[in-house]
Amino acid sequence: MRYKGKVYRPPSEAYSLIVQVTYGCSHNRCAFCDMYDDKHFSMRPMEEIFEDFRMARQMYRRVERVFLADGDALMRRTADLVQILDLIYGLFPECERVTSYASPGSLHAKSEEDLRLLRQKGLTMLYMGLESGCDAVLSKMNKGHTAAAIVAAGQKARRCGFALSVTAISGLGSLELLEQHAVETARALSEMNPEYIGLLTLMVEPGTPLERWVREGSFTVLRSPDILRETEIFLRHIDSPGSVFRMNHASNYLTLKGALNEDREALLARVHKGMEGYGLRSEYMRAL
């Protein structure tokens, strides 16, 4: 496959065919993120996209999963995405699912009619970053949307038949907003009730505005005891029946896996063991 710049995918897409249909991120201004700082957001030429899929058909005997990159493939015109989906399922009849990142902006820009069409054509799951349910945190981090707008986008995706995977970031509120970040993030996720919830832990990337704030002393990076305290508050407030919960990213100090709400007490028990020092990942083992 031919790739432009750095390419990212969710952990669950490790064995998927990844093809860029857009370049970069449509927002690309979050204060904590450097993922797409090597390129400007743009639409990849359709001819190149078709060529990559045809090359993949020649290279791979079976392609069961496809991930449409980069950071906001849903920003493409609906007609383009329909052509891409038709090509995928035509070339790979064995394909079981096609997924992509989506932003609150791209979900709000698409009509429900268009979203339902894309779902009918085989776009099965969307990954979206909430980051925080706290508007003060979202504003400081320049997310570009309020919590209510992100929740509405997630609810729209679910209403139109998509499976939805939503991520949030522990530590994003620093010490100042620790409890508010935990409680309001739990509330926002509860209102969306997505199929999957992923909780990452903040890591400071060089060259970002956040890194400058840390150097200047205006932002305090939480260490593991405060992250675990925040996680405990989050788990006590989340109410999202049926959601698969994962805190197993390489950035996390503690690995948690379970189903909400039924595994809440078991998850909390594991957090409490972590507070006693059991099962924690060393700082040097953490990565994005």
Image (cartoon, grey):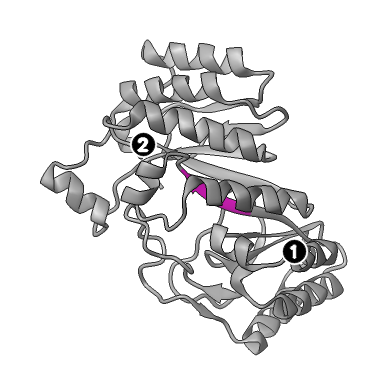
Let me know if residue 12 appears in the view. no
Give the alpha-carbon distance from disc 2 to disc 1, as whole Å: 40 Å
Residue pointed to by mark 2:
285
Q: Amino acid at mark 2?
A: Met
Q: 224 or 112, which is in the foreground?
A: 112
Q: Which residue is found at the position 29% from the left and 47% from the top? A: 204
Toward the left, the furthest residue is 216
Q: 186 or 196, which is in the foreground?
A: 186
Using residue 8 as the reference point, say whether residue 66 is left or right of it.
Answer: right
Q: Position of residue 255 (x, y in %)?
A: 50, 28
Q: Which image quarter is the N terminus in?
A: bottom right
Residue 286 drawn in magenta:
no
Residue pointed to by mark 1:
115
Determine the secondary structure under disc 2: helix
Give the number of the mark in front: 2 or 1. Answer: 1
Residue 45, above or below 209: below
Q: Position of residue 103 (x, y in %)?
A: 55, 59
Range covered by the magenta-colored residues: 127-131
